[in-house]
Amino acid sequence: EAQVTQNPRYLITVTGKKLTVTCSQNMNHEYMSWYRQDPGLGLRQIYYSMNVEVTDKGDVPEGYKVSRKEKRNFPLILESPSPNQTSLYFCASRSPAGGPSGANVLTFGAGSRLTVL
Amino acid sequence: DQQVKQNSPSLSVQEGRISILNCDYTNSMFDYFLWYKKYPAEGPTFLISISSIKDKNEDGRFTVFLNKSAKHLSLHIVPSQPGDSAVYFCAASALRGFKTIFGAGTRLFVKA
């Protein structure tokens, strides 16, 4: 089954304790991205990666890091989490333009709910 | 600066009637628009899309209309079913761009 897998699904942590949210896709997509969802703000892009070793900032990159060492994995790293990073996080990968589902269609993981105390 | 706006946080519709969800955008560089549907505890899933070269795209009960001059698109669901109750996100991108911008979402309630 084509899917994007995120872990952990739920996490409660404390301010300053480094954490990593993993993301893996099995569709051989070159493009991957991280979003956070907050009430009234929708989904905001944190970082994206066009391919292995190629990453760029989205609209809300502050406090986050990413890496793309392999095509299938795109972990999100919070080096020193703060309470304002409490949110619901989604990883997504994208079909190439003109793929079977249409251009630019994102496939999302189930989400990771993070609480920073 | 919200480039994609969904001004209705929620919408309630009777089963069998039409649901109309609206979305406005500000950036003329967007040329591809998508709607995603999200159930609780799940990730958003792709519903339907439209290219800026079209003004309408239909897929079963779902139709998306695009008015480029008004920078407005809408999603019509006919007939609405209780299983359509979810949050709907409007999204916009450049066809070969690397960013997809989402609206804040509209929560649809379809009453049986």
Image: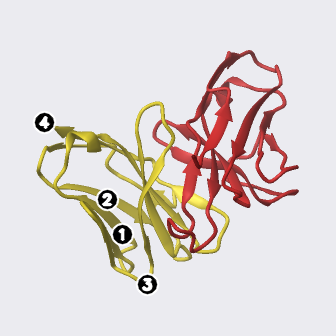
Q: Quadrant of residue B111?
A: top left
* Label 4: which secondary element: loop
* Residue type marked 4: Ala
- Residue A82 to residue B101: above or below: above
Which residue has dot 2 on it?
B22
The answer to the question of whether label 1 and label 2 lie on touching residues, with beta carbons closer than 8 A, is: yes
Identify the secondary structure beneath mark 3. Answer: loop
User: Do callouts 4 and 3 point to residues on the same chain?
Assistant: yes
Q: Position of residue A105 (x, y in %)?
A: 54, 61
Earlier in the chain: of badge 4 and badge 2, it is 2
**What residue do we see at 16% from left, 54% from top?**
B79
Marks 1 and 2, how far apart at CA: 7 Å
State which mark lies toward you, 4 or 2.
4
- Residue topped by disc 3: B53
Q: Which chain is red?
A: A
Spatial separation of the CA atoms under disc 1 and disc 4: 30 Å
- Label 2: how many residues lie within 10 Å, few (<14), some (14-19) or many (20+)? many
Q: Earlier in the sequence, mark 1 or mark 3?
A: 3
- Nearer to us of marks 1 and 4 is 4
Query: Considering only order in the chain, which callout, 3 or 4, is on the residue closer to the N terminus?
Result: 3
A16 w.r.t. A70: above or below? above
Q: Are marks 1 and 2 on the same chain?
A: yes
The quadrant in which the C terminus of chain B is found is: top left
Q: In yellow, which chain?
A: B
Q: Residue furthest front?
A: A1
Distance from Cα at disc 4 to Cα at disc 3: 37 Å
- Residue tagged by mark 4? B112
- Mark before the other along the chain sequence, 1 or 2: 2
Q: Quadrant of residue A49?
A: bottom right
Q: Distance between the Cα atoms at labels 1 and 3?
A: 14 Å
Disc 2 and disc 3 in contact, CB within 8 angstroms: no
Amino acid marked by disc 1: His
